[in-house]
Amino acid sequence: MAGTVTAVDAFAKRPLWTQLYVQVLAAIVLGALVGYFAPQTGEAMKPLGDAFIKLVKMVIAPVIFLTVVTGIAGMRDLGKAGGVAVKAFIYFFVVSTFALILGLTVANVVKPGAGMHIDPASLDPSKVQEFTAKAHDLSPVGFLLEIIPNSVVGAFAEGNILQVLFFAISFGIALAMVGERGAPALRVLESLGQAVFRLVSIFMRAAPIGAFGAFAFTVGKYGIGSIASLAALVATFYATSIGFVLLVLGFIGWLNGFSIFKLIRYLKAELLLVLGTASSEAALPSLLEKLERAGAGKEVVGLVVPTGYSFNLDGTNIYMTLAALFIAQALGIELTLMQQLLLLSVAMASSKGAAGVTGAGFITLAATLQVVDTVPVAGMALILGVDRFMSECRALTNFMGNAVATLVVSRWEGSLDRVALAAALNGESEELAEPAPAGAAAD
C-alpha cells in the first residue's frame, strides 16, 4: 500500500549509531581502551561480560529444544531428518579434517616456534594442571555416555547442548509419529518458540554492555603486551584462520551459490559479539534466527547448527595442530612425519570428544598431547598467556564455519530459499534484535 512504511525501510532509515553492530564495535574499542589505560578498572568490568553470557546461555537450551522439535515434528518424512544428519556429519568430517591438516601444514611451513630454544626442564606443569585434569574426561566411552542425560530437567538445568539436542531429536521424532494428535502440542511449541526468540532479541540489547565488560577484562588482565612475546604464533594463527574463512569457506560458499563476504556482512553484529565475548555460544540463538530468515530450512537449521557447535569446530582444529607443533618447535623437538600423522589422528578424535566442554580448545590440546607423549603437556604453559586472545579467533572461525555448513546442507536438502537468501545477503532483510521503530508495519 502506498505510504506504508515497512519494517525493512524503517530499519534502513535508522541512524547508524542505533544499529546493534555499531554499538558492539564501539563497546569493544572502549573496552580495549579502558583495559589498556586502567587495567584494574578493566579487570573489574568482568561481571558485565559474565552477566551477559549467562543471560544468553540461559535461553540456549530452550531455543535449541524448540527449534529442533518443531523442525523435526513439522516434517512429513522422518527419513529426511536422518538424511540431514548424515549429510551434516559428512560435511563436518571433511571440512574439520581439512582444518586440522591446514594447521599442521602452516606450522611446518612458517615454523612460528623455531628459534625459541626453551629448555623443557624449565617448564612448570602446575600451570596447566587444571586443563590436563579435565582432559581425562574426554574418553570416547565417557563422551558417548555423557550425551544421554541423567534426567531431562538436568540437561536443561546444566545447559548441556548435546544432551538437550539428544532429547529434542527424540521428542521431535515421537511428536511427528503421533501425527494429527500431536498438532496442538506442535502449535503450542511454535508459539513458545516465537516468544523465546523475542526474549533473545530483548537480551541482545545488552550486547554492547557485555562486549565492553568482557573485552575490558581481557585487555586489563592479560595486557596487549603479552601478545608481543608470542607474536609469531598469534599472527600465524590469525592469518591461517582468516585465510581458511575467506578462501576455503569462501570457495565452498561459491560452489553453493553465495558469497562469503556477503554472509560476513549479514552476520556482522553476531561476529562482533563473538569477538567481544570470545564465545560463539553468545551468538548461537541469533544465528539460528538469522539463518532461518536467510532461507535455510527450519529442520536443517535446528539440526546442523547445534551439532555443528559440538562437532564442526574449524577454528579449534586449526589451533590444535598449529599450537601442538609450535610447542614442539619451541622446545626443539623434531617430529617425524609418522608422529605428526599420529598427532593429526588423535586431534581428530579428541576434538569431537570435547563437544560442549567449556574452554574446549585448550582442553582438547591437553588431551591430544597426553596421548602423543612426544610433546610434553607442560609445554602448554608457553601459550597459556595468549590463549585468551586466540580464543576469540577460534570462536569467530567456528561461528562462520557453522553458518556456511548450515547453508550448504540446506542447499543439498533442496530446502534453501534462494530468494530469501539473496534478500538477506544483499541487505534487504532487517537485522535481528533490531526491532523497527514504533509505527512501522508489522511483518
Image (cartoon, rainbow, N blue to C red):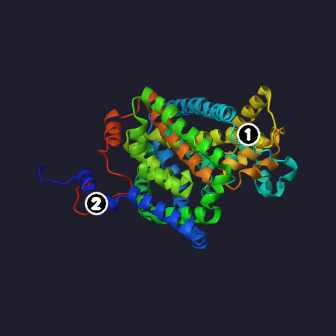
Vertical arrangement, residue 342 with respect to residue 319, above or below: above
Q: Earlier in the sequence, mark 2 or mark 1?
A: 2
Callout 2: helix, strand or loop? loop
Percent of width and height locating residue 373: 84, 39
For disc 2, the neighbor class at 10 Å (few under 14, some 14 to 19, many from 20) is few
Distance, label 2 to label 1, CA atoms, is 50 Å
Q: Which mark is residue 114?
A: 1
Percent of width and height locating residue 157: 62, 60
* Nearer the observer, 232 or 246: 232
Q: Is residue 119 left or right of residue 39?
A: right
Q: What is the three-letter code of the residue carrying label 2?
A: Pro
Judge whether residue 53 can be spotted in this image: yes
Residue named by callout 2: 15
Q: Is residue 18 left or right of residue 80?
A: left
Q: Residue at x 33, y 37 (%)?
A: 422
For disc 1, the neighbor class at 10 Å (few under 14, some 14 to 19, many from 20) is some
Q: What is the three-letter code of the residue carrying label 1?
A: Ala
